[in-house]
Image: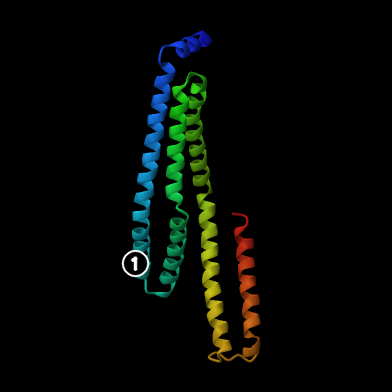
């Protein structure tokens, strides 16, 4: 029965022309939305970058300043890679493809399944991210602490190098090499601690 219905639909006068017209309109709409999104993103990106920079600059104290700087750099990288823009374009493309495939009898099945596949994939990805958030937060805390220790070690050994700090067991000439070894040790320790998470 489905094959007979499909054949009648395909032989209906003007059915293919109507389907092609709807697909063409959807394609034109997708291209127009793509152009509009590109313009909006180009306008929005420098303003968001300036806002992030201004918010990070408000923090003047040591730890808060370092943390704000790290957050600013991370958000700047996200803006640079245009992650939100690309995800929105991907969602629009999937919706367009699903709509176009549903217009033609031979590809309707794929179009109907594509939206369900995309929503299921996003739901699975979102669930996996939510499940991983506690472990991810522990890893972030470990790396933030390692970063602070890195900064303290760097300042300490720089003081030894410039003879502002004098120690009987550490010479200024060997402070640079010792600093590098200690910093490598700090990061190896952080990676080992974060690995289970």
Q: Between residue 62 and residue 13, name the one nearer to us.
A: 13
Report if residue 29 is visible in the image.
yes
Left or right side of 181 for 132 = left
- Residue 18 appears at what percent x and percent y? 39, 20
- Residue 1 appears at what percent x and percent y? 51, 7
Quadrant containing the C terminus in the rendered view: bottom right
Quick check: 22 above or below 41? Answer: above
Label 1 packing within 10 angstroms: few (<14), some (14-19), many (20+): few
Q: Please name the residue that numbered disc 1 is placed on.
A: 54
Q: Residue at x 46, y 30 (%)?
A: 98
Quadrant in the picture for residue 59: bottom left
Report if residue 171 is visible in the image.
no
Q: Between residue 125 and residue 18, name the one nearer to us.
A: 18
Quick check: 43 above or below 160? Answer: above
Q: Residue at x 55, y 82 (%)?
A: 156
- For the image, the number of numbered tags is 1
Quick check: 179 above or below 17? Answer: below
Left or right side of 138 for 24 = left
Quadrant in the picture for residue 22: top left
- Residue 68 appears at what percent x and percent y? 42, 66
Quick check: 17 above or below 99? Answer: above
């Amino acid at each position: 029965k489905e094959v007979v219905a499909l054949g009648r639909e395909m032989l209906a006068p003007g059915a293919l022309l109507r389907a092609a017209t709807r697909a063409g309109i959807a394609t034109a709409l997708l291209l127009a939305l793509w152009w509009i999104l590109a313009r909006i993103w180009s306008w929005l990106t420098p303003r968001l970058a300036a806002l992030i920079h201004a918010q990070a600059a408000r923090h003047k104290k040591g730890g808060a300043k370092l943390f704000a700087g790290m957050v600013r750099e991370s958000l700047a990288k996200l803006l640079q890679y245009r992650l939100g823009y690309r995800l929105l374009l991907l969602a629009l493309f999937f919706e367009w493809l699903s709509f176009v495939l549903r217009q033609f009898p031979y590809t309707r099945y794929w179009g109907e399944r594509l939206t369900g596949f995309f929503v299921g994939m996003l739901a699975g990805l979102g669930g996996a991210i939510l499940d991983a958030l506690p472990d991810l937060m522990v890893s972030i805390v470990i790396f933030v602490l390692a970063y602070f220790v890195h900064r303290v070690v760097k300042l300490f050994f720089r003081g030894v190098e410039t003879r502002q700090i004098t120690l009987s067991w550490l010479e200024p000439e060997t402070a640079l090499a010792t600093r590098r070894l200690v910093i490598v040790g700090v990061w190896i320790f952080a990676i080992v601690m974060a690995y289970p998470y």
